[in-house]
Image (spheres, grey):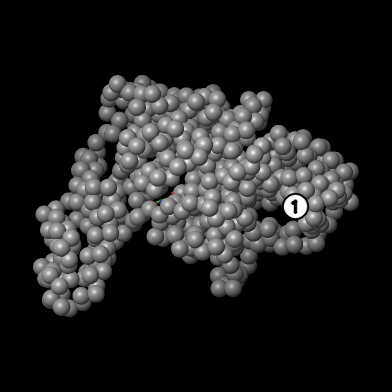
Amino acid sequence: MNCDKLTADKGEQALIEELLNAGQEHLFADWDAPGVNNDQKTAFLQSLAHINTSYPGGLTGYISNARKLLAEAKAGANPFEGLTPEQPDTVNLTTFDATYDHYEALGQNHFSKTAVVLVAGGLGERLGYSGIKLDIPVEVTETTPYLAHYAACLKAMEARMSTPRPVPFIIMVSDDTAAKTRASLEANGFFGLKKEQVHILKQELVPAIADNDGHLALKEKYKLILKPHGHGDIHMLMHTSGLAARLEHDGIEHLFFVQDTNGQAFNALPAALGVSVEKGFDFNSIAVNRIPGEACGALTKLIGNGNELTLNVEYNRLDPLLRATVSPEGDVPNAEGFSLFPGNINILVIKMSSYVQILNRTQGIIAEFVNPKYADAAKTAFKSPTRLETMMQDLPKLFGPREKTGVSVFDRKWAFSANKNNIRDAAAKHAAGGPSESGATAESDFYHAGRIKLAAAGMDVETAEEKLILGIPFTPGPRVVLRPAFAMTLAEVREKIKGGKISGNATLVLDGKNITLENVEIAGGSALVVRACDGANVTAENLTVENGGFELVPLTDEEQTSAATPEYLKLRGYRIENRAAQIAEFKKPGEYTIS
Ligand code: UTP
């Protein structure tokens, strides 16, 4: 080793010794002669020191955790040894009935005691977008980025409080997303939010591991391969930043956790909050019905070892666990064709007081896991370096017998539709019978949620037939966007919309708190957009809208590959063009009628 004293200070020398003792000689084996490439050596040592301080237990702690988990993975250890699975405590909210209304009303009254946590540190490798996922538009009728949509939801929550107060918004970023997330907020005036209500927490990347012996993987001679540690880091950061305790002190009683590209999440918020409040759940997992065998984490109550925990069990572990314990047939369907174990969609409602206690007890350090892809049957080598990861939904692993975990099951497309896959993989996933989880399906489902709201209010909704765009399913219309400012609950939609009809391919966008439509008919292909500022009371009655509307135009082959086409259009394969839609905008308070 040519690790000369010129490049390493005392602390770094001690760390080098520690790493050598931990079997990491290869990190320094190939060093240039003393005095050569000192800048690179210094930067390398600084990066090692930085990771050493940011990971609980330091770098050698990380290496020893990795060795232990890799040995378990190699041995095929059963993490559920001694545990018996049972159906979790579940509240069914898949139909929009009186129960749903009850929980929504309860939840809406709780907005003033709720903060929103957005985990947005992921690389988005599967999507392959060059920017951050939060900047991608969830819909391209008006081109609204996810971040703008989430901000609008927070502002709408505030507008519904009896004494309005900004909803705290915690965004977890990583080195991969931090600068662009900050830039996006700054460039857009924080999307109308107050700067002080937004709290950015940055997670650190962790070193990749090359083999079962826990050797850290090098990208170059003086550079480690670093990778995201998973969204479970949010709990540690909420603790170490002191934010969890501060929010509790400020009167926040629940945290609502969402992911970066789920435009449906806030549809579930009011009812999910209502469930948490009424049932006293410390941890409420928002879930959807799952078909047995479906590749989606299964929420399962696990009983044994003197405890009872409801956890996310990976689908490929659930079936063998059931067969080995309670059900020789494994994961079987109920009368409706669904598994008894609902699918996790990673929207969480966590009770603040229990959260702070657990964080104080555990520093928010979540159980890690490792998922190496082996290159050989004997599991001696990896196809590519792996790393330790954590998942935010694993928080209940830190629970004791007093903490209560429940599951709220929602209609799938109402609560979840993510944009995770590039256009080619999305088409392949659809062809294989799975969900595409792409830009197009996320947008299609966004409009679907709008249609659900109109139908719940009694409007006659005539849905167009699903078609394929570049092999990805898309329902062309009606394309309905009821902005959060217009309504946060179904009860609100019912108050503001009476009767009427909307036909396939039509578009309706309503943005503003005081808009009412009574017996409005929007003909096929036509469009109505109403935007009303606070204090503008807008009514449309007995109106028939007929115009050129918005047209969905598939991209040509040339456009699909052209550098001039925005990337957010390429990842869905179409654009939407205004062909003389009726756009009614009211920028001053007053009484207005649309005709
Ligand atoms: P995904 O499963 O979508 O992973 O993350 P990803 O890393 O963003 O995308 P791929 O796997 O590279 O394609 C689910 C949520 O967790 C966040 C993501 O930003 C997303 O909101 N996440 C993921 C983090 O905040 N940190 C991480 O280390 C990983």
Would you say 43 lies left or right of 449 here?
Answer: left
Would you say 372 lies left or right of 421 here?
Answer: left
SS under mark 1? loop
Residue occupying image coordinates x 22% and y 53%: 59
Look at the image and tell me whether residue 308 can be seen: no
Would you say 274 lies left or right of 349 here?
Answer: right
Give, as a three-letter code, the residue at label 1: Cys
The quadrant holding residue 65 is top left
Counting from the top left corner in percent of width and height, residue 143 is at 64, 59
In this picture, is 279 found above or below 293?
above
> Which quadrant does the N terminus fall into?
bottom left
Counting from the top left corner in percent of width and height, residue 265 is at 56, 43
Q: Which residue, given by chain and number where applicable, does mark 1 sit on?
A: 533
Along the line of sight, which residue is nearer the eye, 530 or 16?
A: 16
Counting from the top left corner in percent of width and height, residue 180 is at 48, 63
Q: Which residue is farthest bottom?
A: 36
- Mark 1 surroundings: few (<14), some (14-19) or many (≥20) residues within 10 A: some
The quadrant holding residue 136 is bottom right
Along the line of sight, which residue is nearer the eye, 469 or 360?
A: 360
Residue occupying image coordinates x 69% and y 42%: 487
Counting from the top left corner in percent of width and height, residue 568 is at 57, 62
